[in-house]
Amino acid sequence: MKKFALALVLCLFAIPNAKACDTTFEIRNAWVKPTMEGKNITAAFLDLKNTSDKPRKLTAVSSPAGVAEMHNTIMDNGVMKMRQMEFVEIPAGKTVNFKPKAMHIMLVDLKKPLKEGDKVKLSFYFDNDETANITLPVSAAPATGKSEPEEHHHH
């Protein structure tokens, strides 16, 4: 039992920028845009890589900061529009990019404005009942590097 507890502690507090224990994905370049004055809406961006040999679906995202929704920006008759997505398919071994003016995570009904230097927690839910919680920096510019999930669960 002591060995299991030690392994769990080491896994949860793994070295920063290392792949989290038993995860089947990597998150890089994660950041949240600061809110504009008087607004309670913004977006989160990141690169999500499926490191497994099977396709995966990101089925939902949530945040205690407000409502989190997966959106895609499309051109419709010359007009840029956003559409909410029910899931995001992540092919085996591939990376899906959530970036400005493309697929992204909308944060709406925020409880407070977000400014540079703040942090936002997001929870990711996958089709195999796997979840991961990460904290993203609020920044006016994209982050670079790998973000390690804080928690990782299989149900």
Image (cartoon, rainbow, N blue to C red):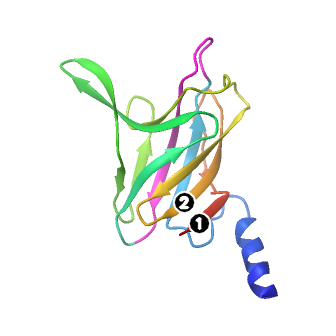
**Quadrant in the picture for the N terminus:** bottom right
Q: Which mark is residue 58?
A: none
**Numbered range of the magenta stretch:** 35-52
- Residue 116 image offset from top left, x and y in percent: 70, 27
- Can residue 27 be seen here? The reply is yes
**How far across and how far down the image is residue 103, in percent?**
39, 38
Q: Is residue 42 above or below residue 136?
A: above
6 left or right of 18 in image: right
Amino acid type at mark 2 = Thr
Q: Quadrant of residue 128?
A: bottom left
Count of marks placed on residues: 2
Q: Nearer the viewer, residue 18 or 81?
A: 81
Does 117 lie within the magenta span? no
Left or right, residue 52 beside residue 110: left
| Mark 1 or 2, nearer chain start | 2
Q: Position of residue 93 (x, y in %)?
A: 39, 65
Which numbered dot is residue 131? Answer: 2
Which residue is depicted at the point 65% across and 64% down? Answer: 18
- Tell me the amino acid under the disc marked 1: His
Q: Residues within 10 Å of mark 1 (few under 14, many from 20)?
A: few
Contact check, label 1 and label 2, Cβ < 8 Å = yes
Q: Residue 82 occupies which quadrant of the picture? A: top left
Instruction: Residue at 53%, 59% (x, y): give it.
Output: 26
Is residue 39 covered in magenta?
yes
Neighbour tally class for label 2: few under 14, some 14-19, many 20 plus, Cα within 10 Å: many
Which residue in the structure is indicated by mark 1? 153
The residue at 54%/26% (across/down) is 42
Q: SS class of the residue under badge 1?
A: strand
Q: Quadrant of residue 112?
A: top right
